[in-house]
Amino acid sequence: MAGQVGSTLKRFVLWDYSRATWQYDVMVGIILAFIFLTPREIFRDQPRPKNIILINAGSGNPSYWIEPELVTGASVAEQQKTVEKLIHSQAGGKSFTVSRVEPVYDHEKEVRGYIAYTTR
């Protein structure tokens, strides 16, 4: 009995069953169940895109790309303050002042993001 279980397990591990057999179908079903039923949180590998990206630091005054979701709902006056707080948290304590924030539009005139220009 133990030898039969060991042999069956060995054949499963080595994928030794022919196609169109019930054993093969069971192995495929187990794999598919693992793929589709395993919660995402177990692997913790979901992409986390950056919302603030440094796009120009070579000229001395860096510029940042800001995702529109971070500034949505703020008035023009509040946008600059919000963006300045976000950049300070991203820049690791470096002191920059946001001189201007310009929206970037796509071909349908929707805001795709903002570029924040800073000065020291």
Image (cartoon, rainbow, N blue to C red):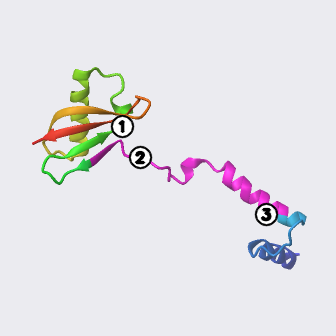
**Residue that appears at 33% across and 29% down:** 71
User: With respect to residue 27, does 118 lie above or below?
Assistant: above
The one nearer the camera, 23 or 4, is 23
The one nearer the camera, 37 or 110, is 110
Instruction: Tell me which segment is drawn in magenta.
Output: 25-54
- Residue type at the position of mark 3: Met
Q: Say which quarter of the image contains residue 11.
A: bottom right
| Disc marking residue 49 | 2
Quarter of the image with the N terminus in it: bottom right
Q: CA distance from mark 1 to mark 2?
A: 10 Å
Q: Secondary structure at mark 2?
A: loop
- Residue type at the position of mark 2: Pro
User: Which residue is most to the left?
Assistant: 120
Q: Nearer the viewer, mark 1 or mark 3?
A: 1
**Residue that appears at 36% across and 26% down:** 72
The residue that disc 1 covers is: 67
The residue that disc 3 covers is: 27
User: Which residue is most to the front?
Assistant: 107
User: Which comes sooner in the sequence, label 1 or label 2?
Assistant: 2
Q: Is residue 95 rendered magenta in the image?
A: no
